[in-house]
Amino acid sequence: MPADPRNNRRPPDDLFPLPGVSDIGRVIRSDADDSIGDLPTAFETDGPAETAAKGFIGLTVSDRTLRIFFGLLAAGLAVVVLRLAQVQIINGAYYAKQAEGNRSRTELIPSQRGIIYDRSGQPLVRNVPNFTVLLRPAELPAGDAGRQAVARLAAAIGSDPETIRQAIDAQKDRPLDPVIVGERLTHDQAVLASVEAAQDNAVELDVGTRRDYTDAADIESLSHIIGYEGRLADSDVRDHADYLPSDLIGKTGVEKFYESTLRGAYGRRTVEIDALGRKKDVISEEPGQPGLNLVLSIDLDLQKQAEAALKAELKAIGKTRGSVIVLQPQTGEILAMVSEPGFDGNLFARGISAADYQKLADNPDHPLFPRAIAGSLPSGSVFKLAVSSAALEEGTITPSTTVLSTGGIHVDKWFFPDWKAGGHGLTNVTKALAESVNTFFYAIGGGYGSITGLGVDRIIAYARKFGLGSQLGVDLAGEGSGFLPSKQWKKETKGESWYIGDTYHLAIGQGDLLVTPLQIAAMTAVFANGGQLIQPHVVAALTSSDGSRQVVEPKILNPQVVSSRTIDVVRQGLRQTVTEGSARSLQDLPVAVAAKTGTAQWNANRPNHAWFTSFAPYNNAKLVVTVVIEEGGEGSSTAAPVAKDIYAWYFGPH
């Protein structure tokens, strides 16, 4: 019996014929199953047909492919290892801190804001409790629960739900930031709000302070000096990232200028919180640093008197706007500063109503405007102090040079008048200052007859030496710069050349020239102290809670503006103004006063501005007093009486 072919080690050739190249993938038939279809299997042969039996069923992979595969695998493992090292070793502390933050929160602890005093130590402001309610929209429950929470909170703080919802909507682009929904709460409202805060993590009661300006209601001019605090505007938020949403910030005056000094440094408290964000325990606390106190150079009693004197004169002549500057000429300390009309800073500190704010904003006299430092006005004849000094310094004139005043001068078809019909006769520089003789200043400014004038460039150069045309740097927000014209400015702005008439007008303080009351006071102080231009300032010292005191030293802007010889000549003219000239009404004061009057034309259809600037005592000056009454007419008749009242009070018995 023949052997079973299935027992042979090698199958018959006719059962599995060896494939050629074209037979790869041939269908393999089986006696057991005729239904097997095409198999995706290749038989790889390496030569003759008889070696095909060495083939195998599967896919072949080249060495190059294996190397690429294992290379990529190794690179991937390396990336994983490096990332683990970065997380665990390099940034381990950071992620540990992040994890810690999941169960703790850092809070800022507001510091006590510094107090502001007058020069004698009398407090001008105090800190009073202020309760504020904040709501975190992101933590407010959704749906009816959230609406009910808002309704309960509104009832607790005396508000209404719609107002709170509007406040939330106004800040919808910052859902994680708390929204102020109630301010300046009463004690009872604060108690009810604290109950809501204990029950609802979205509610927070902030217990802080606000300012109370103790004398601002009686002496409104203080508000232009001290300023006031207000809520952070969007620009404040951008510029002060470390402020809390409930914080107040200085908006005007020294409150703004010395904001960082008064604020101090906030402390930090780390508290443990539960899963709902409620405080459980204090982990650590770092105390803050209280703000420094400010001792102003302002004499409160003198400030009150200066305001009263200006108000009385304004009322008498039916005007509403004016300024007074009283400063110490040796140090630059401002002893009093009045801008009329004024306002009560407590309106803002306590939360000004829309009606009250609109009333201030619509007032045509602009009571919020600090005109004593910011108002830019034509100077009139008080500018002659700078022009006469320039002419003496430049040798354009000597103290004995005279000009004949016959009522004005003619240049071609133009006439430039004196204020006195018929003129003042022969006039030297001291008489020209005392009687404010325009003809003399036309001649030394623009030239006339045998006198070659200074010209516009030299006049402006000396004006700058006296501090005109730019800010002096007073430590108050909102200082103005005034304006000094030039040939180039006129050409570029008006498209006109500079004419001799422009120089004549400039020489008597008219034309396009603008000054601030503070600048005129600082210029006057140069003649009172012997030649130094000193930066005016309102803060005399800084004090801390431990009793230490830092005195603000005078800052000298120009140690000798003009020579002592020139200072002496101009001083004689200013004294002669009181003894023989346009300010003889001050002769009966208990001290010798040196002064200059001024009348500034500014509008052909409106009254002139009235100027008066002065210092006393003449030989040992302790005060500079500068007064301007807008649309007040003649300086000698309306501004001078205000200065006289101030001198009489200061140097008289009281």
Image (spheres, rainbow, N blue to C red):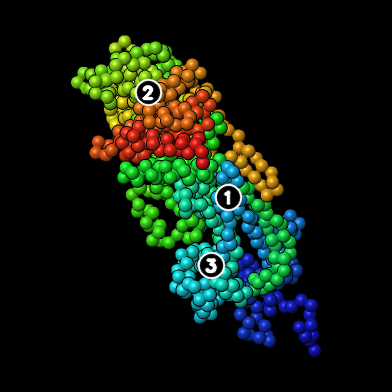
Q: Three-letter amino acid code at disc 2?
A: Glu
Q: Residue at x 55, y 61 (%)?
A: 246
User: Which sits in the foreground, 205 or 321?
Assistant: 321
Locate residue 515: give its quadrant: top left
Of mark 1 and mark 3, the one earlier in the sequence is 1
| Number of residues whose C-alpha sits closer than 10 Å to that of mark 2, classed few (under 14), some (14–19) or many (20 or more) | some
**CA distance separating discs 1 and 3:** 25 Å
Between residues 367 and 147, which one lies in front from this camera angle? 367
Q: Residue at x 35, y 17 (%)?
A: 444
Q: Looking at the image, can residue 390 be seen?
A: yes
Closer to us: mark 3 or mark 2? Answer: 2
Vertical placement of residue 444 versus 312, above or below: above
Does residue 403 appear left or right of residue 527 in this picture?
Answer: left
- Give how far apart the Cα atoms at labels 2 and 1 are: 44 Å
* Quadrant in the picture for the N terminus: bottom right
Amino acid type at image mark 3: Leu
- Which image quadrant is residue 330 in? top right
Left or right side of 342 for 277: right
Labels 2 and 1 touching (C-beta < 8 A): no
Which residue is denoted by mark 2 in the rendering? Answer: 580
Q: Earlier in the sequence, mark 2 or mark 1?
A: 1
Question: What residue is disc 1 on?
Answer: 123
- Residue holding disc 3: 185
Please state the horizontal and vertical placement of residue 423, each as a whole percent of the image.
27, 20
Please name whichever residue, 611 or 102, is drawn nearer the observer in this view of the structure: 611
Name the residue at 45% across, 18% down. Answer: 569
Q: Secondary structure at mark 1?
A: loop
Of circles 2 and 1, the one toward us is 2
